[in-house]
Amino acid sequence: MEDKDVRLKLVLAGLLSAVMLTACSGESTQEEIYQHLEKSVELEVGFVEQQQPISELEQQEQEIYQDISDLGIDQYEEIKTLADEAITTIEERETLTGNERASIDNAKEEFDKVVPLVAELEEAELKTAAETMIEEMNQRYDAFVELNEAYKTSLTLDKELYELLKQEDLEEATFSEQVDEVNAQYQVVVEKNQLFNEETDAFNEAKRQFYEQSDLNISYEE
């Protein structure tokens, strides 16, 4: 049986978290922006919480595929049972991937509340820093959407592969073609993951620059 590429564990960079050490009496525009930025970080907790179970399910699916590969072509019933188990892990990942998207969407919605506040900033350098931060967040969000869609496509192709394995009269050429599609999509996911991490790093730096330009007394939490 032709091998799938081993799914690389996706490492997803998280947002920089900050704590305001002191607050002025009467909330300033800068403090309002801070509140929305850090609320956005909190709303991404759901996204972060999906990573470990997704990774564990990926490992389970890989182990099942290896078990199938070790079976003979005449052990159809065992292959079919294992294929169904693999499909279950894929469907669970589909649910978790949806949870990821909901968390990121909610966080982005909160972040977008910063946009109208930027016009109220009086210092030119601070306003420029805020605008750069917004641009970087938009690019990060777009990169996440691309990653999320690529991963969902990967899951669909994985599921199709296991449905093929449940066919008793499966032709080798058909199977090989599906494996090639699965492996090619894996590489797309890896590339989109790298882009997302790069955009996250760029946003975190832009956010740090904004805070450093501001009058806020900020401490960072990694």
Image (spheres, rainbow, N blue to C red):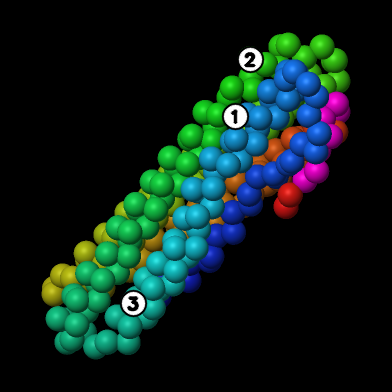
Q: Which residue is mark 1?
A: 111
State the count of labels: 3
Q: Is residue 215 magenta?
A: yes
Mark 3 in CB contact with mark 1 (< 8 angstroms):
no
Q: Which residue is mark 2?
A: 116
Mark 2 in CB contact with mark 1 (< 8 angstroms):
no
Q: What is the distance, in whole Å, between disc 3 and disc 1 at their CAs?
A: 41 Å
Q: Which residue is mark 3?
A: 64
Amino acid beneath label 3: Ile
The crowd level at tag 2 (other Cα within 10 Å; few <14, some 14-19, many 20+) is few
Magenta span: 213-220
Q: Secondary structure at mark 2?
A: helix
Q: What is the distance, in whole Å, between disc 2 and disc 1 at their CAs?
A: 11 Å
Amino acid beneath label 2: Pro
Looking at the rendered image, the disc whose residue lies closer to the viewer, 3 or 1, is 1
Q: Which mark is residue 76?
A: none
The quadrant in which residue 77 appears is bottom left
The crowd level at tag 1 (other Cα within 10 Å; few <14, some 14-19, many 20+) is many
Q: Residue 122 location in percent, x, y?
A: 82, 12
Q: Vertically, is 51 above or below 113?
A: below
